[in-house]
Image: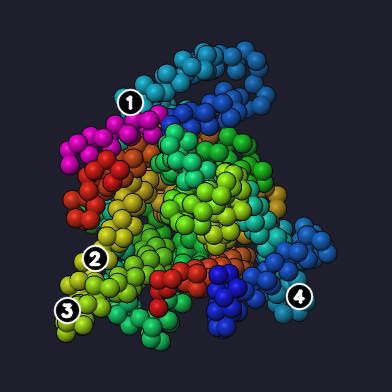
C-alpha cells in the first residue's frame, strides 16, 4: 500500500516540490544543530534596525533591535521550529498509538476509561490547556514540549481507536486469533502495520500544529525563551511595524509560510493517495 | 429523543468531573505557588503564609478540590487576584464584546466559505479547482499573528481605512471598530473551511446515489443543488457547530491586538498577570459550554439524519 501510494504521489510535480522544501528546511535545521550554521546569530553585525541590503548574506534581511542579523535569526528559528514540531510529534505519537490501539482493541471497561479520558481532555479548548500546562511548568522549551505533547496525542488516539474498531472485524485478525496468536503480537505485528499511514499523517499535522502553537505561546510570553524562534520574532515585530521595520516580521512569516505550505500540500497528496475515496 | 438527551446529560457528569480534576491539578498541584507568584521572590515567609491563608491555599488538597467543585457547580469563581473584581461579573461583562466580534465573523465565514466551496466543487478536477485549492492552502499556511499584524498595520495604520483599535458602546461605534477584526477573522479561517467543505461536497458527489440520480437522467444542477448539497451538509454542520463553544472564548490574539474588552483579551491579560483564578474560571466555563454544545449537536443530528438512531450505542 505504501509503495504504490508514494509512487503515485511523487509522479506529480507539486508533491515533489513540497518534499524538496521540507528537505531543505530539515537540511538547514541539521546544519544549524551540527555544523554551526548561523551560530553567531547572537552577535551584533551592525547598527540597530538596518534595512535589508544585498551586500553580505547576513544582511539580506537587515538587523534587529540589537543589531543582530535577521537572516541568521530566521535560520536558527528553523532549527527551533523543527525541533518543537518533531519532538512534539515523536513524544505524542507513542502515547496516541498506545491509548488508541489499546482502547479500540480491548474494548469494554478499558475502552470506557480511555474514552472518558480523551473526551475530558478534548472538552478543554486546546489553547487553554496548552496555556495552563506551560504556565504550570514554568517558561522554557521543556514546558513547550510537554504542553504541546499533552494536547497533540488526543486526535491520533481517537483516529486509531476508530481504525482498530474497523479492523477488528476483518478476517486476518480473526484468523490470527484462531491460530492462537497472542494479544501483543496481534496488536503490534498485525494491526499496527495496517494503521501506519494514519499515524504518519497525524504526525505530520502534529508538526504543523506544534509550530503554529509555538507562535501563540511566544506571544503570550510562555514560549521559547532567549532563542530566536519564529514566534518570538513575529511577536517582537508587533512594536516594530509602526516604525517601518518590516523585515523581521516578513522574514519569519515567509519562512514559516513555506514550511506550513509544504507540509499541508504534501499531507493532502499522501492522504488522497492512501484514501480509496480520493477527492478528485 | 428525550431519553437520549438525558442519557447524554448523565454521561456529561463524569466528563465534567474529569475536566475539573484536570484543571484543578494543573493549577494547584503542578502550577507553582500563587502566593509566591503574587508577592514576588523577595517576600518574607510571613507575608507568603498570610496570603496563602487568605487565598485558602493552606488547607488540605481535597478541601480545596471540594471548594473548586462547588465553584464549578455554582459558577461562582471568586475574585481576580489582580483587579479584585468578581470573576463572574468579569465574564458576564466580557462576553458581549466577544460575541459582537465572534458571532458576525462566524456567520460571515461560514456563508462565504460554503458558497466558495460549492463553486469550487462544481469545477472539481478542472484547472479552476486546482488553482483554488492551492490558493486556499496558501491562505491557511500564513501564521495568524502575521495576518493580524499586517492587517492592522497596512489597512488601519498605513492606509487609514479602519481605526487601529478600540471598542464602543453604540451600534455604529461597534461596526466602526469591529469591521477590521471581523475581516481578519474571516481570512484566518477561510482557507481551512473552504478546503474542508470542498472535500465533503466532493466526497458526496462520488456516492452511488448520485450516479443513480444522473443515470436516471436527472439534470446535473438539480442533482448538485438538491441531493448533493443536502447530504453534504452533515459533515459541514458538524464542522461549523463544533466551533460554537469557541465563539465564547473569542480570539485571544484579535481581541488583545484590537483592545476589545472581551473574554479572549481577558485571558491574555490573565496570563500576563499570573491571574490563576481567572484562567481557571475561563478554562472551566468554556469546557462546560463545549460539553453542552456537543450534546446539543448530537441530538440535533439524530433529528436531522434518519440513518442515526437514538438507540443505546448509536
Residue at the disc numbered 4: A57
Q: CA distance from mark 3 to mark 1?
A: 51 Å
Same subunit: marks 4 and 1: no
Q: Report crowding for label 2: few under 14, some 14 to 19, many 20 or more residues within 10 A (C-alpha).
A: some
Q: Are marks 1 and 2 in contact (CB under 8 Å)?
A: no
Q: In the image, which residues are magenta? A: B1-17
SS class, disc 2: helix
Residue at the disc numbered 1: B73
Residue at the disc numbered 3: B222
Chain hosting mark 3:
B
Q: CA distance from mark 2 to mark 4?
A: 55 Å
SS class, disc 4: helix
SS class, disc 3: helix
Q: Are marks 2 and 3 in contact (CB under 8 Å)?
A: no
Chain hosting mark 2:
B
Q: In the rendering, at what x and y percent does residue A256 appear?
A: 59, 66
Amino acid at each position: 500500500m505504501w509503495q504504490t501510494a508514494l509512487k503515485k504521489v511523487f509522479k506529480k510535480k507539486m508533491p515533489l516540490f513540497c518534499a524538496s522544501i521540507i528537505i531543505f528546511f530539515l537540511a538547514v535545521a541539521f546544519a544549524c544543530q551540527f555544523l554551526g550554521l548561523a551560530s553567531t546569530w547572537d552577535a551584533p553585525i551592525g547598527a540597530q534596525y538596518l534595512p535589508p541590503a544585498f551586500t553580505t548574506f547576513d544582511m539580506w534581511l537587515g538587523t534587529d533591535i540589537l543589531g543582530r542579523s535577521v537572516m541568521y535569526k530566521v535560520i536558527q528559528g528553523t532549527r527551533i521550529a523543527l525541533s518543537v514540531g518533531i519532538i512534539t510529534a515523536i513524544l505524542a505519537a507513542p502515547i496516541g498509538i498506545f491509548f488508541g490501539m489499546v482502547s479500540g482493541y480491548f474494548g469494554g471497561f478499558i475502552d470506557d476509561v480511555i474514552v472518558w479520558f480523551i473526551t475530558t481532555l478534548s472538552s478543554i479548548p486546546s489553547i487553554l490547556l496548552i496555556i495552563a500546562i506551560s504556565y504550570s511548568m514554568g517558561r522554557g522549551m521543556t514546558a513547550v514540549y510537554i504542553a504541546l505533547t499533552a494536547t497533540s496525542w488526543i486526535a491520533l488516539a481517537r483516529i486509531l481507536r476508530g481504525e482498530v474498531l474497523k479492523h477488528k472485524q476483518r478476517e486476518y485478525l480473526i484468523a490470527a486469533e484462531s491460530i492462537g496468536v497472542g494479544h501483543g503480537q496481534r496488536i503490534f505485528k498485525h494491526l499496527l502495520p495496517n494503521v501506519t499511514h494514519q499515524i504518519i499523517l497525524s504526525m505530520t499535522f502534529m508538526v504543523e500544529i506544534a509550530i503554529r502553537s509555538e507562535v501563540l505561546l511566544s506571544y503570550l510570553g510562555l514560549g521559547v525563551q532567549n532563542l530566536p524562534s519564529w514566534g518570538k520574532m513575529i511577536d517582537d515585530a508587533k512594536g516594530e511595524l509602526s516604525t517601518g521595520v518590516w523585515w523581521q516580521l516578513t522574514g519569519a512569516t515567509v519562512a514559516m509560510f513555506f514550511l506550513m505550505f509544504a507540509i499541508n500540500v504534501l499531507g493532502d497528496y499522501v492522504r488522497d493517495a492512501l484514501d480509496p475515496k480520493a477527492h478528485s | 429523543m428525550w431519553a437520549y438527551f438525558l442519557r447524554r446529560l448523565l454521561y456529561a457528569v463524569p466528563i465534567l468531573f474529569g475536566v475539573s480534576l484536570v484543571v484543578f491539578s494543573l493549577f494547584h498541584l503542578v502550577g507553582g505557588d500563587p502566593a509566591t507568584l503574587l508577592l514576588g521572590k523577595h517576600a518574607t515567609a510571613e507575608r507568603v503564609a498570610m496570603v496563602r491563608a487568605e487565598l485558602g491555599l493552606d488547607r488540605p488538597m481535597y478541601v480545596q478540590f471540594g471548594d473548586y467543585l462547588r465553584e464549578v457547580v455554582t459558577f461562582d469563581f471568586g475574585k481576580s487576584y489582580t483587579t479584585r473584581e468578581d470573576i463572574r461579573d468579569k465574564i458576564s461583562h466580557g462576553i458581549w464584546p466577544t460575541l459582537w466580534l465572534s458571532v458576525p465573523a462566524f456567520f460571515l465565514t461560514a456563508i462565504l466559505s460554503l458558497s466558495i466551496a460549492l463553486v469550487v466543487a462544481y469545477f472539481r478536477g478542472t484547472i479552476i479547482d486546482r488553482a483554488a485549492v492551492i490558493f486556499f492552502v496558501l491562505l491557511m499556511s500564513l501564521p495568524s499573528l502575521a495576518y493580524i499584524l499586517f492587517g492592522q498595520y497596512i489597512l488601519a495604520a498605513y492606509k487609514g481605512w479602519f481605526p487601529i483599535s478600540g471598542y464602543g458602546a453604540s451600534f455604529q461605534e461597534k461596526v466602526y471598530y469591529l469591521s477590521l477584526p471581523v475581516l481578519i477573522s474571516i481570512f484566518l479561517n477561510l482557507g481551512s473551511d473552504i478546503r474542508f467543505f470542498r472535500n465533503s461536497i466532493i466526497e458526496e458527489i462520488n456516492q452511488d446515489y448520485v450516479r443513480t440520480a444522473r443515470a436516471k437522467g436527472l439534470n446535473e444542477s438539480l442533482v448538485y443543488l438538491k441531493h448533493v448539497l443536502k447530504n453534504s451538509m452533515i459533515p459541514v454542520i458538524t464542522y461549523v457547530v463544533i466551533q460554537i463553544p469557541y465563539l465564547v472564548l473569542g480570539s485571544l490574539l484579535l481581541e488583545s491586538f484590537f483592545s476589545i474588552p472581551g473574554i479572549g483579551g481577558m485571558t491574555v491579560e490573565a496570563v500576563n498577570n499570573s491571574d490563576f483564578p481567572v484562567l481557571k474560571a475561563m478554562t472551566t466555563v468554556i469546557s462546560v459550554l463545549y460539553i453542552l454544545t456537543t450534546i446539543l449537536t448530537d441530538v440535533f443530528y439524530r433529528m436531522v439524519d434518519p440513518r442515526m438512531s437514538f438507540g443505546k450505542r448509536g
